[in-house]
Image (cartoon, grey):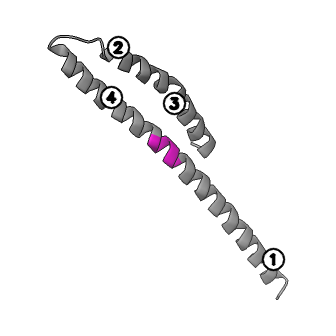
Amino acid sequence: MSSDRLATLEREHKEVHTPANETLKTAASKWIGTSAPALQGKLGFLQKISDNVEHELEHNSKALRQIGHEFERTDEMNAERILVTRQGR
């Protein structure tokens, strides 16, 4: 999976989960009875998972992008070294 694809997944995740989380928070304020605390606890747990997914997508996208740049830089340095060696310098 490419860093661009991960960045796209991160953006799509935010686009879907941000408004959904707000809707759930609004609804949670109206929950009543003994099930309300249990549902609010579960909601908080699920939102933490959602936040973690978003963080991991962001982190891995940046990491893959950095790895790609390092490979590119390494390839350029090796190509230069090979050319210098072939020219007998």
Residue at the image position 80 percent from the left and 81 percent from the top = 84
Separation (CA) of disc 3 from disc 2: 20 Å
Nearer-N-terminus badge (4/2): 2
Q: Distance between the residues labelled 2 and 1?
A: 66 Å
Measure how far apart labels 4 and 2 are at the Cα level.
15 Å
x then y, percent, for residue 55 = 45, 42
**Residue that badge 2 annotates:** 27
35, 77: nearer the viewer: 35
- The numbered mark, 3 or 1, whose residue comes first in the sequence reads 3
Magenta stretch prevailing secondary structure: helix
Quadrant of the rendered structure where residue 11 is? Answer: top right
Question: Mark 2–mark 1 contact, CB under 8 Å?
Answer: no
SS under mark 4: helix
**Left or right: 9 with respect to 84?**
left
SS of the residue under disc 2: helix
Q: Residue at x 75, y 71 (%)?
A: 79
Tell me the crowding category of disc 1: few under 14, some 14 to 19, or many 20 or more residues within 10 angstroms, Cα based: few
Q: Residue furthest left?
A: 34
Sequence-earlier tag: 3 or 2: 3
Counting from the top left corner in percent of width and height, residue 48 is at: 34, 35
Please name whichever residue, 2 or 85, is drawn nearer the observer in this view of the structure: 2
Q: Which amino acid does label 4 sit on?
A: Leu
- Image coordinates of residue 33 in percent, x first then y, are 17, 11
- The stretch drawn in magenta includes residue 58: yes
Q: Which of marks 4 and 3 is nearer the N terminus?
A: 3
- The residue pinned by badge 4 equals 46
Circle number at residue 49: none
Span of residues in magenta? 55-60
Q: Which of marks 2 and 1 is nearer the N terminus?
A: 2
Expressed as whole percent of the image width and height from the top left, the position of residue 4 reads 63, 41
Q: Which mark is residue 14?
A: 3
Direction from residue 24 to residue 40 in the image, left or right: left
